[in-house]
Image (cartoon, helix red, strand yellow):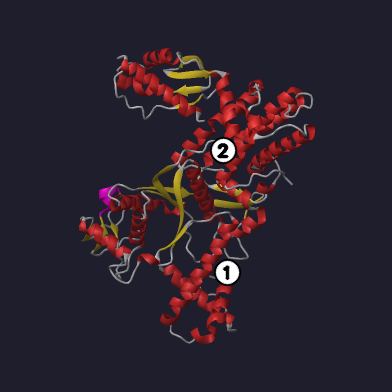
């Protein structure tokens, strides 16, 4: 039951009624009209900007249009008051029975309350993490992993058909460096003293196991071969080893992808199987690829710039600042060429809506990639890039930098092992993705209201404890969903109770808005606010016995308040599930 959707429909009906009577022009664009909660509960339950955004097209002023709308809306028996605020906003006060109905709907729906109707089209591809398979993931990768996973869960809960994808960057020069690093560890496993790892290779001890596996598989056979003979074998073994480690780390974080897509798979041996070649030729056939020279970049250095005749994509035709190279001077493909082919493959595989989650250091790459998606999809595809800012890892306020495992950074797995999956996941989305995040290892394990994940989980555990108390006090009380939904919910009239019910009424709107904006942090903020309101009501019951959830002398009020707690618990669990965080029955 989406209260805001219901009253938005009624508002549209009122506007249509005015148009039919000639009081308004027909065909007004209602896209900017919203129905939302009032900022101050004293001003009513719902507010709309309809008169403000339609007045100009209607040929009148906002207050005059608001007056017409109020006359129309006041005919609705469920609206007890409609009044103009400020220059033309409209505030509506609803019958209390409306919120009783919302609470009942939340009780009956349980964990499905707020879930959107299925939207099979367009299918959505969310690509996230996609860390180079050259070592263990750090906490920055973890932020992208949690954000992407929570976003995919949010979109699925809102009704979208979602695929979670990981792009394996296994075709660049970095995997050859990885192979050479692994080959050193292979020689070490054979008993050689390899000394210090040369600069330019990967020094972490995470490649020791890869070297041992190579030694077990090949013995000394690779040691005396030329590099061009052993490099492909060692490279694939190293990539497989790193991806196994990455998958394991992601699993520890509760992140599971539907698909792992190899960059190398795009580059077949000939034009018939080489997707990058096919993509370039397709663009060339539409005059979107040409041979030309680029002017030198202004200001900051551009690594793609070379002063030579080269193969260029007409990115400027699709909103980019300059045209972009597709081939390097040695004839190999640029990263950009591979990425164009990759996104073309997403579209061909049936994903017109694409969402990429990248690190903040890729911000300069966004415009060209969006231009490429417009080009290869003929304008039918869209790409939204969500940038995740840096994570500063702290311990009680002091920055943490070093790692025993990687040699130069703290790995994601070390953080998960220390503070737990739930703390990592919740804190990673308890701040907007484009803002820098301070992650304090000491703070996130505190059992206090200053620790957001504990505060929300504790609220859910409190809800569960209330039901355990009720079963002790009333062993024969029917606590089925049907019984709870049938309770006399009209007795919940305290200001704090009503305030929480109104929060529950806004949950479907939160889900819908967060999914549309691709902002899962909104759900984390909401459940934290709901937990805070619930804890406050719990404390209020200490001084006001009539507000206690279990009243041994009053079965009727107990059943009503248990129904209320059931709805709160369901919404807390639902929001935590979107975040990928457990909803515990007890806190130990």
Which residues are drawn in magenta? 314-319
Residue appearing at x 32%, y 72% in the figure: 269
Give coordinates of residue 94: x percent, y percent. 53, 19
In the rendered image, the vertical position of residue 232 relative to residue 27, given as above or below: below
Which sits in the foreground, 163 or 90? Answer: 163
- In this rendering, does residue 575 appear at all? yes
Residue 315 forms part of the magenta stretch: yes
SS at mark 2 in the image: helix
284 to the left or right of 257: left
Residue appearing at x 48%, y 87% in the figure: 224
In the rendered image, the vertical position of residue 182 relative to residue 288, given as above or below: below
Residue appearing at x 58%, y 80% in the figure: 189
User: For mark 2, does the 10 Å Cα neighbourhood hold few (<14), some (14 to 19), or many (20 or more) residues?
Assistant: some
455 to the left or right of 580: right
Within the image, what quadrant is residue 577 found in? Answer: top right
Q: Which residue is mark 2?
A: 525
């Amino acid at each position: 039951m989406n209260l805001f959707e219901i009253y938005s429909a009624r508002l549209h009906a009122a506007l249509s009624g005015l148009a039919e009577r000639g009081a308004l022009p027909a065909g007004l664009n209602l896209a900017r009209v919203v129905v939302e909660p009032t900022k101050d509960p004293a001003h009513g339950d719902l507010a709309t900007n309809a008169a403000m955004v339609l007045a100009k097209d209607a040929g009148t002023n906002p207050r005059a249009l608001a007056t017409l709308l109020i006359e129309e809306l006041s005919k609705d028996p469920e609206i007890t008051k409609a009044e103009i605020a400020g220059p033309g906003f409209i505030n509506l006060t609803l019958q209390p029975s409306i919120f009783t109905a919302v609470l009942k709907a939340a009780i009956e729906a349980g964990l499905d309350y707020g879930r959107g109707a299925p939207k099979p089209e367009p299918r959505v591809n969310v690509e996230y993490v996609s860390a180079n398979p050259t070592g263990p993931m750090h906490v920055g990768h973890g932020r992208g992993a949690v954000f992407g996973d929570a976003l995919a869960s949010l979109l699925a809960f809102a009704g979208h058909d979602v695929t979670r994808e990981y792009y394996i960057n296994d075709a660049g020069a970095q995997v050859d460096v990885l192979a050479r690093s692994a080959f050193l560890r292979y020689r070490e496993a054979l008993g050689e003293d390899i000394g210090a790892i040369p600069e330019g290779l990967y020094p972490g001890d995470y490649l020791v196991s890869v070297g041992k596996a190579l030694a077990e598989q090949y013995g000394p056979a690779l040691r005396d071969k030329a590099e061009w003979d052993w490099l492909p074998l060692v490279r694939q073994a190293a990539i497989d080893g790193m991806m196994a480690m990455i998958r394991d780390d992601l699993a520890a974080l509760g992140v599971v992808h539907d698909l792992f897509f190899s960059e190398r798979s795009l580059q077949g041996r000939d034009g018939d199987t080489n997707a990058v070649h096919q993509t370039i030729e397709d663009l060339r056939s539409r005059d979107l690829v040409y041979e030309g020279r680029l002017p030198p970049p202004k200001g900051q250095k551009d690594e793609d710039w070379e002063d030579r005749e080269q193969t260029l994509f007409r990115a400027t035709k699709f909103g980019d600042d300059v045209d972009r190279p597709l081939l390097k001077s040695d004839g190999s493909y640029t990263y950009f060429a591979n990425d164009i082919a990759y996104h073309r493959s997403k579209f061909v595989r049936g994903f017109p809506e694409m969402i990429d989650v990248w690190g903040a250091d890729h911000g300069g790459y966004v415009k060209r990639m969006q231009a490429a998606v417009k080009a290869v999809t003929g304008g039918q595809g869209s790409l939204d890039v969500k940038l995740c800012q840096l994570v500063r890892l702290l311990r009680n306020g002091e920055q943490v930098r070093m790692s025993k495992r990687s040699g130069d950074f703290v790995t994601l797995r070390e953080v998960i092992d220390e503070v737990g999956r739930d703390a990592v996941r919740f804190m990673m989305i308890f701040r907007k993705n484009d803002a820098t995040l301070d992650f304090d290892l000491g703070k996130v394990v505190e059992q206090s209201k200053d620790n957001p994940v504990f505060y929300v989980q504790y609220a859910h555990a409190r809800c569960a404890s209330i039901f355990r108390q009720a079963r002790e006090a009333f062993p024969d009380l029917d606590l089925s969903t049907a019984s709870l939904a049938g309770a006399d919910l009209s007795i919940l009239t305290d200001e704090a109770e009503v305030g929480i019910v109104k929060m529950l009424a806004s949950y479907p709107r939160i889900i819908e808005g967060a999914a549309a904006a691709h902002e899962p942090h909104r759900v984390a903020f909401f459940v934290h606010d709901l937990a805070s309101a619930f804890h406050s009501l719990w404390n209020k019951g200490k001084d006001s016995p009539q507000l206690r959830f279990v009243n041994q002398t009053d079965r009727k009020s107990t059943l009503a308040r248990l129904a209320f707690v059931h709805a709160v618990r369901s919404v807390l669990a639902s929001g935590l599930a979107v975040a990928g965080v457990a909803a515990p029955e007890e806190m130990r």
